[in-house]
Amino acid sequence: MATLQEYKCPCCGGAITFDSSIQKMKCPFCDTEFEMETLRQYDEALKKDAVDDMNWSETAGSEWQEGEQDHLRSYVCKSCGGEIIGDENMAATLCPFCGNPVVIMDKFSGYLKPNYVIPFKLDKKAAKEALRNHYKGKRLLPNLFKDENHIDEIQGVYVPFWLFDANVDASIRYRATKVRTWSDSRYRYTKTDFYSVIRDGGVGFSLVPVDGSSRMADDLMESIEPFNFKEAVDFGTAYLAGYVADKYDVDEEKCIDRANQRIKKSTEEIFASTAPGYTTILTESSSIAFNNGKAKYVLFPVWILNTTYKKQKYTFAMNGQTGKFVGNLPVDGGKYARWLFGLTALLGAIAFGISYLIWLI
């Protein structure tokens, strides 16, 4: 059975968590604050604590079928003795019985240990406020979604990311156009000139992020970028207390293709920007070579909010460092129909006015 790590207040015995507003560990019961550096040695000592062996005899339930429990793990809360069931990637969570934050130490041993972590700077209250602000100005949003919808779930999650560094040598050929239009009393003319634009050179990329969790949609995670890596610190399990954390289940090798796509696209855009003055410029062919490629394993802070409307689930994400908020919203069919009718009527009135003026002329 894996080892669970909890952080107890030396003053009152309460469970302490990482407070993003002061960037320290804090006891919610006696308000005692602890510096992160002070807890590092305490953390090492706690890792040596023994875990109770509290196995129950199997007298109920049916037998598991082959393969059903391959991805399940069972842990015992040291505070209340409750059993916590999770999948193989769960690395930090809250005990569902007593609410104490726990860190599953075995998930961060050996090669699974992250290099860095960016601590949460924004709390749950800020995430809820960001969701309310996300509703503002959305005229087609259903009233019930705003007025009666509740947040089913809100979690602060440390999401695993791979950060890639690479130097790039590239040779790219673009097809470009210059379009000129003019008119006389009878005709309107368009002239299009075509060009072949060639660019060769090098560019360096640093900290290109790729989501290392299959549970998190790549487009959702990329939408809340960027994260400020200057605020990253050396990984310590104390930062995870009070939050949910997963280890990666998409390894470095499997993330390389996504990193290559992002770097290739950015290289083509950067080189294209060195050829101004064209109406259009499109990549025809590109040859890109990497060298000095390196990767880091880090944890980024993300608030995940889930809401339900008419039995459909809507997921929102907020950057726990910068506050950038993204997520799709439902559309009220009635409001959309009225808006479309009004837009059609407006365009019709404008067209009638123009035709009437032409008739007068």
Image (cartoon, rainbow, N blue to C red):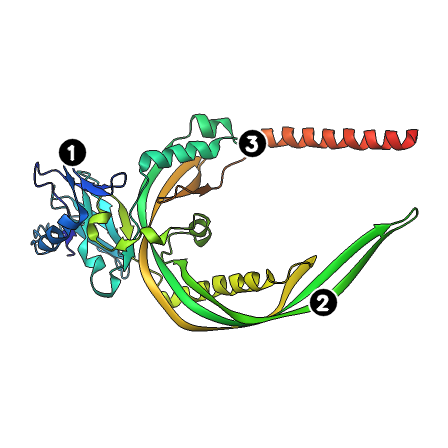
Amino acid type for the residue under numbered disc 1: Asp
In the picture, the disc for residue 31 is 1
**Residue 354 or 68: which is nearer the viewer?**
354
Residue 159 visible from this viewpoint: no
Amino acid type for the residue under numbered disc 3: Leu
Q: Earlier in the sequence, mark 2 or mark 3?
A: 3
Judged by depth in the image, the label closer to the viewer, 3 or 1, is 1
In the picture, the disc for residue 150 is none
**Res 352 → quadrant:** top right
Quadrant in which the N terminus is drawn: bottom left
C-alpha span from label 3 to label 1: 45 Å
Q: Which residue is mark 3?
A: 140
C-alpha span from label 2 to label 1: 68 Å
Q: Which residue is mark 2?
A: 195
Q: Earlier in the sequence, mark 2 or mark 1?
A: 1
Relative image position of residue 359 (x, y in whole percent): 91, 31
C-alpha span from label 2 to label 3: 45 Å
Amino acid type for the residue under numbered disc 2: Tyr
Under tag 3, what secondary structure?
Answer: loop
**Residue 137 or 172: which is nearer the viewer?**
172
Relative image position of residue 196 (x, y in whole percent): 69, 69
Mark 1 burial class by Cα count in 10 Å: few <14, some 14-19, many 20+: few
